[in-house]
Image (cartoon, helix red, strand yellow):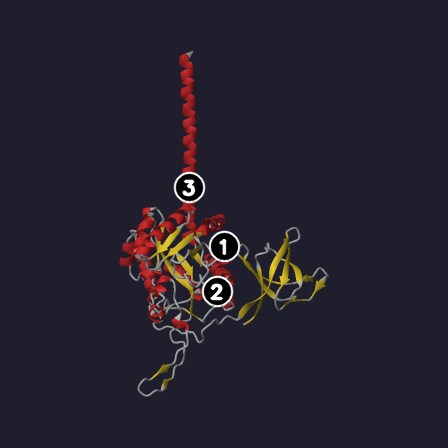
């Protein structure tokens, strides 16, 4: 009898072991499938990386189809003074929002690092690791080394100025993704991508190194953004995220000997136009680029929303085989509505000299004007309530509703009620208005009217 019971115990334990083994095998299989799906997605479509300078821009990026977002924390990033920036305490919320939508998260720590920064760097990276951020974008070896030490994925910043395959092979010891120098032509980038495959250049993950390039946004007159004008004139280092934008100002050139002013075609002789690649995005994909990066952490949420949506549609059109000139014309028209200094293709198509902006500010065809704030939302009827604090609003006006959780939502007011008195065609300052939306509105949201620039 004891022998039978003992045998039963052995059979029971064996069945438990087989069940556990089966479950473990299932987990491994699903993990493998998930990894392959992720790789298929990334190899099938170029990754679209969006900027996020605050929560409204972050949400705008997520809502409009970004595959990944990059952002800075506190002062150690290249947009330290041009945007609000996130805090360490924001990292879990950033991670949560992005994880819910399958969006990858990249922390930028790509400034010059001094000895007194090292303890801060370690704190930032430890918090990033705890928050399960995807990777850190870095240029300084101190950042790269510590990120690798704690097991964080590293992306090499454009500040490194990678221009050849040997440099790619060197940094492959530390990173899986590398941003190429913005001064390269598309042919040079294509050759680097081909060499990565030919020479089987792999990063720490074991995967082939991925090439990333900037696809849209501001360009710097200096090589890969490493400019010293601001430091020289204002003791404010652009390489520490504190650029004073000397290049965007208007200048007059005067002959010191004669005192005569030298005639210039363009007074903004150091201010490049914005990069725009949407009209040859198919060539970028064909070149083997894996990640397309949108510049603009210092720009408004509507910029992020519009640019990301246009490039999302373009990437999908390329994958679906219906990318054409008519679509490009439509995207260009929409891109012109948000902040830009005029567009050019950068150096990607072989152009050797830059193109310069004709004015100090934006060439956008429209602008937003603040008119009020959110007060209440009635979810059953999808009715939003606002207080008009400035100017007026009429039926047929285009509006932007922006907030930390709402992101940036654009719509046309088709019908509205004023002060619960009934349907009205126009509302003015101090009026309380309601109109229907297809998204939730919050008391923290701001209401803007979109008008011609």
For residue 443, which quarter of the picture? bottom right
The image shows residue 177, relative to residue 181, as above or below, that is: above
Residue found 32% across the figure and 50% down from its top: 146
Task: Please say whether residue 184 is visible from this viewpoint.
Answer: no
Seen in the image, is 408 located left or right of residue 10?
right
- Marks 3 and 2: CB-CB under 8 Å? no
**Measured along the vertical axis of the image, is residue 26 above or below residue 430?**
above
Most distant residue in the top direction: 1
Residue 307 at x, y = what percent? 48, 62
The label shown at residue 31 is 3
Task: For marks 3 and 2, give the CA distance.
Answer: 38 Å
Which disc number belongs to residue 62? 1
Q: Mark 2 points at which residue?
A: 324
Q: Say whether disc 3 or disc 1 marks the residue closer to the N-terminus.
A: 3
Q: Where is residue 241 in the image (x, y as percent from the top left)?
A: 38, 62
Distance, label 1 to label 2, CA atoms, is: 26 Å
**Local crowd size for mark 2, using a 10 Å CA cut-off: few (<14), some (14–19), many (≥20):** few
From the viewer's perspective, tell me whether residue 306 is left or right of residue 399. left
User: What residue appears at the point 42 percent right and 43 percent down from the top-left corner?
Assistant: 33
Vertical arrangement, residue 318 with respect to residue 3, above or below: below
Describe residue 13's horizontal placement relative to residue 149 as left or right: right
**Real-space CA distance between mark 3 and mark 1, rounded to the nearest whole angstrom:** 25 Å
User: Which residue is pictured at 65% across the width and 64% down the height?
Assistant: 430
Q: Tell me the mark number nearer the camera, choosing from 3 and 1.
A: 1
| Label 2 element class | loop
């Amino acid at each position: 009898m004891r022998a039978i019971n003992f045998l039963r115990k052995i059979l029971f334990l064996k069945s438990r072991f087989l069940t556990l083994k089966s479950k473990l095998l299932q987990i491994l299989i699903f993990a493998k499938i998930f990894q392959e799906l992720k790789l298929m997605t990334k190899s099938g479509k170029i990754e679209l990386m969006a900027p996020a300078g605050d929560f409204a821009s972050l949400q705008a990026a997520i809502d409009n189809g970004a595959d990944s977002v990059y952002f800075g924390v506190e002062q150690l990033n290249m947009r330290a003074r041009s945007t609000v920036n996130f805090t360490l305490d924001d990292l879990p919320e950033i991670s949560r929002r992005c994880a819910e939508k399958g969006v990858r998260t990249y922390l930028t720590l790509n400034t010059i690092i001094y000895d007194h920064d090292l303890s801060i760097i370690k704190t930032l990276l430890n918090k990033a690791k705890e928050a399960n951020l995807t990777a850190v974008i870095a240029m300084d070896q101190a950042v790269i080394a510590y990120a690798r030490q704690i097991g964080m994925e590293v992306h090499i910043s454009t500040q490194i100025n990678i221009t050849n395959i040997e440099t790619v092979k060197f940094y492959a010891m530390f990173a899986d993704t590398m941003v190429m120098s913005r001064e390269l032509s598309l042919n040079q980038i294509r050759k680097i991508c081909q060499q990565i495959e030919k020479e089987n250049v792999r990063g720490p993950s074991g995967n082939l190194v991925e090439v990333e390039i900037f696809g849209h946004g501001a360009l710097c007159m200096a090589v890969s953004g490493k400019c010293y004008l601001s430091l020289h004139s204002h003791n404010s280092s652009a390489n520490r995220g504190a650029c004073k934008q000397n290049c965007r100002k208007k200048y007059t050139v005067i002959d010191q000997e004669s005192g005569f002013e030298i005639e210039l075609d363009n007074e903004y002789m150091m201010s490049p136009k914005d990069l725009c690649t949407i009209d040859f995005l198919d060539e970028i994909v064909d070149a083997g680029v894996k990640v397309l990066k949108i510049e603009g952490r210092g720009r408004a949420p509507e910029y992020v929303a519009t640019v990301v949506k246009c490039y999302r549609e373009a990437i999908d059109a390329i994958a679906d085989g219906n990318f054409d000139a008519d679509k490009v014309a439509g995207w260009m028209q929409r891109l012109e509505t948000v902040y830009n200094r005029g567009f050019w293709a950068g150096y990607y198509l072989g152009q050797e000299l830059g193109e310069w902006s004709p004015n100090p500010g934006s060439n956008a065809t429209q602008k937003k004007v603040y008119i009020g704030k959110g007060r209440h939302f009635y979810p059953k009827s999808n009715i939003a309530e606002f207080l008009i604090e400035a100017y007026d609003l009429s039926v047929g006006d285009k509006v932007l509703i922006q907030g930390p959780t709402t992101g940036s939502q654009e719509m046309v007011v088709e019908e509205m009620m004023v002060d619960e008195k009934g349907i009205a065609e126009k509302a003015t300052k101090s009026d309380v208005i309601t109109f229907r939306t297809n998204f939730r509105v919050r008391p923290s949201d701001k209401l803007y009217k979109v008008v011609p620039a």
